[in-house]
Amino acid sequence: KQGKLKVEDLANDYLPVDIGKATIKDLINHTSGLRRNYFNAFFEDLSVVKECNNATDLFNKLILTKYKDSLTPINPIGKEEYSNLGYTLLGVILEKVTDMTWLEFINKNIITPLGLSHTGVGKTNIPAYSGATLEPINESMFYEINRANSAGALYSTIKDLDTFAKGLYTLPFNIEDFIKDASIFWEKDRLLLKKGGNITGSEAGLKVQYTDISLKKVKHICIILTNCMEKYKSTDNCC
């Protein structure tokens, strides 16, 4: 909207390394050819991850130094494969062109305008549990959230997600461009917005069906939030 970035731009134009011919739009839609994660196993490198408070920190302090090989595409562009790494790179690009952290940007442009008072990044008063062992997530494991960073580190509530879904049309962006450019999250024939995911100790699912393309009126909405990450189930399929 501000003219600083176009979805047709090559990601390489904004990154210090070569990731091939993927565009910003490819990163958004998980068609960049990049792998799912840059790391080998959860809970590795937590001493470094703990100190990474934005996507650029994570990229410079860990990905470039230890996992640079992960930036080599493993699939052809256009093939859909979910990539948290791609969304970390989107965070890096966003921080470069806006001179803000990704969290500052979404606070200014989404969270604050919509009045999402219980949405953010960090600890909450809700205990979190491992889906594999049902044991509470300990202090060191909590910093796994820093590894997600711009790939999905937000907490929220049912009320805030309901407000988000019903207030999308009020944000200063072109809805038709959003639907076209973020097609992985949108089922055109059903007017359905959808996203599910998990991070250590929690899982979430959101599906919203609108009455028309303006997104001004919600027909159906399903929100699922849990404080236990299930290993073999996905909230994406529960709504």
Image (tube, helix red, strand yellow):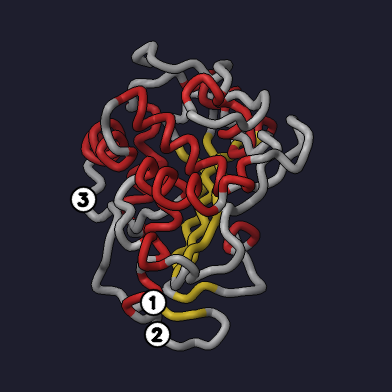
Does the residue at mark 1 contact the one at mark 2 (Cβ under 8 Å)? yes
Observer able to see residue 176:
no
Left or right: residue 186 compared with residue 108 = right
- Quadrant of the rendered image containing residue 132: bottom right
Closer mark to the observer between disc 2 and disc 3: 2
Compare marks 1 and 3 and give the one earlier in the sequence.
3
Q: CA distance from mark 2 to mark 3?
A: 26 Å
- Quadrant of the rendered image containing residue 97: top left
Q: CA distance from mark 1 to mark 3?
A: 21 Å
Q: Which residue is mark 2?
A: 136
For the residue marked with disc 3, what is the amino acid? Ser
Closer mark to the observer between disc 1 and disc 3: 1
Does the residue at mark 1 contact the one at mark 3 (Cβ under 8 Å)? no
Q: Which residue is mark 1?
A: 128
Compare marks 2 and 3 and give the one earlier in the sequence.
3
Q: Residue drawn at (54%, 25%), measured in percent from left and top? A: 213
Q: Residue drawn at (77%, 40%), measured in percent from left and top? A: 75
Q: Which residue is mark 3?
A: 117
For the residue marked with disc 2, what is the amino acid? Pro
- Quadrant of the rendered image containing residue 2: top left
Q: Is residue 29 above or below residue 123?
A: above
Q: Residue drawn at (33%, 46%), measured in percent from left and top? A: 54
